[in-house]
Amino acid sequence: MTDAAPVVLLLSGCNLNLLGEREPEIYGTATLADHVAAFVDELGAAGTVEHVQSNHEGVLIDAIHGARGRCAALVINPGAFTHYAWGLHDALAAFSGPIVELHLSNPHRREAWRHTSVVSPVATGIIGGFGDHGYRLAARAIKELLA
């Protein structure tokens, strides 16, 4: 009998479906699919990745609820939901595994309204500002947290 690899839920919030097209001077030219592939590649055999992207907060909340008791860890790039989506905060607070908050840009180097995160208080850690390297760094963090 072999042990199955732990499941890691990778969540992508609003407008991330436009990566590669939207504001490449801030977010780079890699697409969301490129970032997900980098995450999966870096995680390797340490876990099985499920990815959900939605522009609707409720879809992400449902995915978090569905991860409870099933997924070992969660990585979330909430996009603009970072700053006001208290429903995401509450859903994440009910998740018992490690949570990594991920941002391609550094929100603290941007507009003042981006400096507040409702996700950070329930996240195990935050990775932000490393652009194309962020998803690989998040996968490395998850590997360490699950080891």
Image: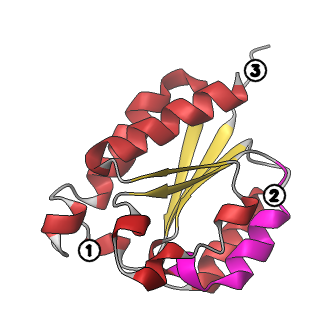
Quadrant in which the C terminus is drawn: top right
Along the line of sight, the residue nearer the viewer: 89 or 66: 89
Quadrant in which the N terminus is drawn: top right
**Residue 24, percent across and down?**
15, 67
Instruction: Look at the image and give the residue range highlighted in magenta.
Output: 81-96
Mark linked to residue 39: none
Look at the picture and state if 119 lies above or below 75: below
**Residue 84, percent across and down?**
60, 86
Q: Is the stretch drawn in magenta largely helix, strand or loop?
A: helix
- Calculate the distance from the C-alpha at mark 1 to the C-alpha at mark 2: 28 Å
Tell me the amino acid under the disc marked 3.
Asp
Along the line of sight, the residue nearer the viewer: 1 or 5: 5
Give the total number of marks visible in the rendering: 3
Q: Are marks 1 and 2 in contact (CB under 8 Å)?
A: no
Please tell me which residue is depicted at 33% across the width and 49% down the height of the picture.
Answer: 35
Q: Secondary structure at mark 2?
A: loop
Q: Secondary structure at mark 1?
A: helix
On the picture, is 113 further left or further right than 87? Answer: left
Tell me the amino acid under the disc marked 2.
Phe
On the picture, is 4 further left or further right than 112? Answer: right
Q: Are marks 3 and 1 in contact (CB under 8 Å)?
A: no
- Calculate the distance from the C-alpha at mark 3 to the C-alpha at mark 1: 37 Å
Query: Closer to the observer: label 3 or label 2?
Result: 2
Badge 3 density bin: few <14, some 14–19, many ≥20, Cα 10 Å: few
In the rendered image, residue 2 lying in the magenta stretch gets the answer: no
**Residue tagged by mark 1?**
18
On the picture, is 146 further left or further right than 50? Answer: right
**Residue tagged by mark 2?**
95
**Residue tagged by mark 3?**
3
